[in-house]
Structures are given as C-alpha cells and as structure tokens.
C-alpha cells in the first residue's frame, strides 16, 4: 500500500506558488515607482522654478 | 533611546508584511499635513503680496513636506509610545512595516530638502521659519515636552500654529502682526481641541506614560481649563475683523461659530467627561459616557470651526472682498 514516489526533478507543490506574485516584489516595485515619480516631479520643479526666478533676466547679460 | 525601544516593541519579524509606498506616505501624517497646507495657503493668500503662482505652490509644497518630515521624525522617536496606544499602534514603525532608522533618515532628508528648496526658490525668511517649526515639533515637543510636562500640547502647539506665518512670509518676505494673529488663533485653539480628545482617550495616554492634562491634573481640572482657554480663544478669533484682515462674512462666521464653541466647551465643563466610572454604579457610568459625547462634540466642532474661519479668510482674500474696517464709515 505504499504511495508511488513522485519523480525527483519535479516539485508539483511549488508550481502554484511560483505563479503567485511575490508580495515583497510587488511592494518593492510600488516603492520604486513612487520614488521615481517623486524624483521626476522634483527635477521638473527645479527646472520650472529656475525659469520663473530667472524670468526675463536671462536675456539681460553682457555679451 | 527611541530606536532601541522601538526595536524591542516592534514585531521580531520586522518585515513580515513588506513596506508599501503607502506606508511611507502614512509616515508623513497626511491628515496633519492637509491642515498645515490649508493654514499655510491661507497665510500666503491673506498676505495679498504679488507672488508667482508657481512659487506660491512651491512654498505650500515645502510647508507640506516640512510638516511631513517632522511627522516622520515624531514617529521614529515615539514608536515606543505609539505601540501602546490603540489610536497609534497601527502606524508603520510600531507595526514593524518600516524600521525606525528608515523613518529617521526620511525625516532628516525631507527636512533638509524642504528648507533648502524654500530658501532657494522662495525666500530665506520663510525657510528659516520652516526650519524652526520642524525643530520645534521634532525636538522641543516630541523629544522634550511630550514626555515631561502636562503643558506639552500648550507649548508644542506653536509648531502647528506657525504655517500661516510661513505662508505669509513666503509671499510678502515679512511677517507682520496679522500673520502672527493667525498663528495665535491656532495656538489658542490647540489646548481645547487636544484636551477634549484626551478626555475620552486618557486611559491610553496613562498606559503609555504620556503626561497629558487629564492624566496629571485630573478630568475636572482639564474640563475647567478647556473652558478657560475657550473663553480666551473665541475673542482672538474675532480680532482679524478689527485688524484689517477679515471682512463682514468673517465676523459673522467667527462670531456665530465662537458662540457654539463656547456652548460646547461649557457643556464639557459641566459634564463628567474623563471621570473614571465605577461600573457598579450605572447612573454614574451613564454620566461619564454622556460626558464623553460632549467631549467628542467639542473635538469635532473645533476642527470644523478652525476650518470655517480660515476658509472664510481664504475666500475673502481670494475674491478681494472689503475688510470689516473698510466698511466702517471713516474706517481704514
């Protein structure tokens, strides 16, 4: 009555787990996207503030 | 010390549920941030000074980020207290989703970033006031006053009261008397607001060892002090109408709302809110529960009242409505 042994190179129990998205990976991906968005917004802000602060003065310089 | 304590109180598998980006947002105390943004923007617009809309928005953003940074520093240092209180134990650091050191790093980096950006993009008076606000909240209030004295939220309230001054300074490059009047309104609003909350959650503060007024002086004294502070607070709310800041709508809103505020504070004083009840005495228990309802009513209305008076000032300044003094014959 012994159960037949599963082939050694196949791990049937692991397959569904591999299909499931890893929550750690998802969390890290979310954090990375949020950080990237924050950095882009900051860079754009620095650019816009520079333009506003300089204004027309950018043309007022000795050549 | 706080990091050691938080390391002890935090779950051992600190990364059991991995930190999501929303946890980092929570670290910045978004609800406090929204109030700070609102009052800061009110100060900026009430200054009625010419400022480029983008620079105005950057100033408000810097105030928001600075407030968030001080919130992160507060969560880092207070992780041991937060872990013991029902209202705060789900925060990212005591829940173990974010390490204390991460909260500290985020707080320091965002503090520096917000102050420097305010200085470079707007002006250094606003940046200096922002730096002082962050220092006052994170160091003076969080690390010193909160665990030491029952006057913690009275003095510490200055940190929450400064954003309108920062906003005003950002727009005008100066901080005149009317800017400090807005600061005084929030400063005097803080004790009745937080003590009303403390009256119905004093058990949590006692358990965490935080010397809130109901824990140290007792509920009856706290209820009396709430009423006294309310008596001082409401007239200060009326003052902007007589200093050339508020108009007739402001006078009406602050007057009518102030009356309701005083009635609610009176009810709290006459109630048994915060008294420890003997569960064997049903009548007393009922009184205490009814008193807690009075305290909740004052707590909720205090938020509404502050929002209403600042919103009225904001709308009046945005629409260019005449101030109350302009309407008086022979007025300024």
Image (cartoon, coloured by chain):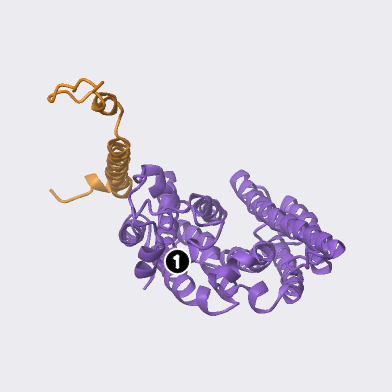
Chain colours: A orange, B purple
Residue B270: give x, y in percent of width and height: 84, 68
Which quadrant, please, contains the N terminus of chain B?
Answer: bottom left
Residue B192: give x, y in percent of width and height: 69, 66
Give left or right: position of B23 versus B304: left
- Label 1 resides on the chain identified as B
Q: What element carries label 1?
A: helix
Residue B7: give x, y in percent of width and height: 35, 64
Instruction: Relative to B228, say whether B295 is above or below.
Output: above
Give left or right: position of B82 versus B16: right
Instruction: Please state which of residues A60 and B253 is positioned toward the viewer in this rendering.
Output: B253
Instruction: Please state which of residues B64 and A30 is positioned toward the viewer in this rendering.
Output: A30
Give left or right: position of B255 versus B91: right
Total label count? 1
Residue B50: give x, y in percent of width and height: 47, 51
Which quadrant, please, contains the C terminus of chain B?
Answer: bottom right
Most extreme residue toward the right is B283
- At x 18%, y 23%, the residue is A5
Q: How crowded is mark 1: few (under 14 residues within 10 Å), some or many (20 or more)?
A: many
Specify whether residue B93 is in view: yes
Specify whether residue B329 is in view: no
Instruction: Please state which of residues A2 and B67 is positioned toward the viewer in this rendering.
Output: A2
- What residue does disc 1 label? B80
Instruction: Please state which of residues B66 and B51 is positioned toward the viewer in this rendering.
Output: B66
């Amino acid at each position: 009555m012994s159960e037949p042994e599963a082939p050694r190179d196949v791990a049937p129990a692991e397959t569904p787990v591999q299909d499931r998205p890893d929550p750690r990976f998802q969390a890290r991906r979310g954090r990375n996207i949020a950080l990237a968005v924050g950095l882009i917004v900051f860079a754009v802000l620095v650019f816009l503030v520079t333009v506003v602060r300089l204004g027309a003065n950018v043309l007022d310089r000795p050549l | 010390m706080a990091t050691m304590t938080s390391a002890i109180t935090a779950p051992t598998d600190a990364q059991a549920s991995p930190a999501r980006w929303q946890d980092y947002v929570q670290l910045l105390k978004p609800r406090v941030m929204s109030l700070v943004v609102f009052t800061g923007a009110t100060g900026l617009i009430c200054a009625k000074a010419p400022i480029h809309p983008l620079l105005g928005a950057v100033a408000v953003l810097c105030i928001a980020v600075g407030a968030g940074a001080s919130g992160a520093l507060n969560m880092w240092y207070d992780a041991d207290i937060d872990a013991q209180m029902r209202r705060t134990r789900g925060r990212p650091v005591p829940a173990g989703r974010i390490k204390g050191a991460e909260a500290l790093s985020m707080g320091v980096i965002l503090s520096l970033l917000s102050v420097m950006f305010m200085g470079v993009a707007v002006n250094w008076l606003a940046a200096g006031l922002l730096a002082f606000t962050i220092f006052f909240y994170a160091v003076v209030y969080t690390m010193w006053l909160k665990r030491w004295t029952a006057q913690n939220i009275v003095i510490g309230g200055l940190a929450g009261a400064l954003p309108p001054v920062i906003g005003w300074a950002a727009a005008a490059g100066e901080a005149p008397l009317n800017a400090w009047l807005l600061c005084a309104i929030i400063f005097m609003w803080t004790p009745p607001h937080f003590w009303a909350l403390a009256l119905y959650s004093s058990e949590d503060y006692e358990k965490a060892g935080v010397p809130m007024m109901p824990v140290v002086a007792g509920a009856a004294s706290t209820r009396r002090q709430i009423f006294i502070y309310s008596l001082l607070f409401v007239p200060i709310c009326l003052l902007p109408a007589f200093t050339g800041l508020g108009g007739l709508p402001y006078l009406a809103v602050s007057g009518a709302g102030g009356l309701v505020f005083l009635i609610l504070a009176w009810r709290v004083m006459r109630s048994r809110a915060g008294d420890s009840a003997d569960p064997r005495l049903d009548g007393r228990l009922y009184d205490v529960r009814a008193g807690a309802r009075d305290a909740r009513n004052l707590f909720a209305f205090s938020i509404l009242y502050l929002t209403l008076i600042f919103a009225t000032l904001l709308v009046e300044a945005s629409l260019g409505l005449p101030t109350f003094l302009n309407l008086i014959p022979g007025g300024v």
